Image (cartoon, rainbow, N blue to C red):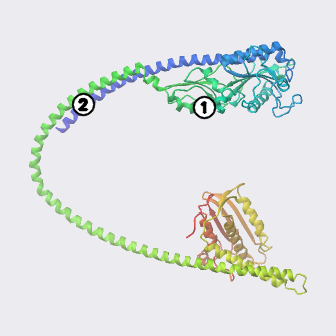
Amino acid sequence: MARIFAIIWLTLATLLAVFSYAVQQRWTENMIQARQHYIDLSHKDTMRGVENIENKVKSIYENLRTLSYLPGVREIDRHGTNFTPDARIAFQQVYNNLALNLAVSELYIVPVDLAPDRVDPITLKNEMPIMIFDQLTSAAGNGLSDHEQSVKTANVGKRSATELQEVEEFEYQQLVAQMKWLKANYGSVEKIKGFDVPFISGNETITNGNSAFTQSLKEETRSGIIFSVPFYGPDGSLKGAVSAILLSNKVDALVQSNNLALINVNNGYANGDLSDMSLKSSNSFVKEGRPDKNLIYSEVLPLSVIDSRSPWYVWAGLSDNHFNESEVVKSATKSRRQEFLTLAGIGLAAAISIYLMQVNLAQARRLNQVMKNERDLSAKAEAEATLSSETFQSLNNDIWRLNSDLAEKIKLLTQAQEDIVEKGKMAQLGNLVATVAHELRNPLGGVRTTTFLLRRKLKDSPIDVEAQLDRIEVGVSRCDNIISQLLDFSRTQPLSTEAKDLNLWLQDLLVEEAAKLHEDITVCCVLSAPEIFAEIDSERLRRGVINLLTNAADAMVSKTGIKLVGPEHRPEIIVELQRSARGVEIIVRDNGPGIPAEVMSKISEPLFTTKSFGTGLGLAAVRKVVEMHGGGLEISSVPGMGASFTIWFPMKATKTIAA
């Protein structure tokens, strides 16, 4: 019976799913059609906006190209002294047209050899463009040459002393860069075919336009783009360029749409009035010149006006809200909702009917089940008895396991107690060592000072005590070295780290310390990388490396100069600095007799030494300093072939205090 009802429920669910799928599929098809229609209409609107922008940019280009062909421009001299009134009027009218209709802020005639950092011998000021037009006027007085601007005290458009100072260096430097490019690519008129005069632009730069900056004091209000067209002299060679500046805050007037942006990816320029807040997330796509894949409609269209250096594009995009709030979408969504509600009502009625049938049948089955349960009670009691027996056995196993765990924990606790006692002994030893070292260093300072004074007073004396004084100084130095080892071993203060170039640090150390070793010992330095920087306590790590050098030297040559390996042996110490996966490694390797196996097992223990004059704290102190840097000390040796000591630590010290 349950199987029959399962089939009934499955059939009902299948029918509801099929009808729901049909409703959803019809809605999806309607939405696809509506979406495509929306994209097509948006594309047409965008094309109208692109055409408008193209016409305006093309107008700038055509006006600049026309000016570049004027005889007055082609024949103009460096300071514009031969620029006729007629030519000025023509230039002024073109500037008026560009300023009023296309928001151009300035118009320049730029010489090909402009050098703003160079002083003009005529004007005795830094070089400027030949002519500058930056004010609307019906006369020709606005266009002033650099010479006229330097010698006239009163001229049209002169600013008062209370106004903000103009910033010219940025736009002049970009004009210099544009002249350099034109000279390299269009140095003569023969390279131009017909009227295809090159039209170039550059990166957004700060300009002289202070009109909006005076009010806002924001640099972006006087940032703009420089468009340039070359002009040529009567001999056909490049003479300069006619340049127009379009302020970035005026680009909105050029674009005239809140869903379009004018972009030039190569120049890193993107500007437009994307005032729709839902389009703010598209700014990264705008800057990269890519359609926003998250929008239903977004595309990037090229401008037909050719920029000879870097193409211009128009980015377009509309918020999805425009599509989602359209009447077509609302109507389709409402129809789908009504159809789903109808299906839900039919399904609910069918489900109630099926449920009532199941309830009646279930009551009959329960009566049969009661009788069956009585028969099963005896079998259940027997099963419970068996289960109790198994439970007692499992409990016994758990008790045995707990006893084993307790014995293991007691063993670990005993080991921990022994470790604590050992660390306490080492701490007491460290305090004792620090106290003894401190008390010995002061008397040693007195001995060293007394030796120095005796040497100076007996310098001219017939008494020869130089050998005795040398022995005193050697003994004092040896004791001082032992004290340093004691202090390094007992010291607990944090590291004093600084960033060091380990190549230079290690070279300086070896140059200084190699001179103190026996003359028969050769010290080689191997640097595997040009620069290795790390944070280290340079003084404490220095003593550690010196300790390893001294140990290597003592293993090969005795204090009296006797070679311990053999008379023909050539003692050599190789110090290698290299990077590794764990940070930095400093390897001190010698070709001495090596370390015997019985010594190797004890060599890192404090107070263990094979020397008659050692403290047994040298390697322990080295290991402690390296571990404070977050690293470690590794020792390897092959008897008869030398020993190798490797100090390693991360690039950045962990600044820990050893226990």
Q: Name, please, the residue furthest toward the top.
A: 86
Rendering quarter of residue 412 = bottom left
In the image, what residue type sits under mark 2? Thr
Q: Residue 387 carries which label?
A: none
Q: Which image quadrant: the C terminus? A: bottom right
- The residue closer to the viewer here, 70 or 304, is 70
Answer left or right for 378 relative to 550.
left
The alpha-carbon separation of the residues under discs 2 and 1 comes to 55 Å
Q: Residue 11 carries which label?
A: 2
For image coordinates 23% across by 64% down, the residue present is 391
In the image, what residue type sits under mark 1? Lys
Who comes first in sequence, dot 2 or dot 1? Answer: 2
Answer left or right for 105 relative to 465.
left
Residue under circle 1?
287
- The residue closer to the viewer here, 380 or 51, is 51
Q: Is mark 1 on a helix, strand or loop?
A: helix
Q: Is mark 2 on a helix, strand or loop?
A: helix
For image coordinates 81% across by 28% down, the residue present is 128
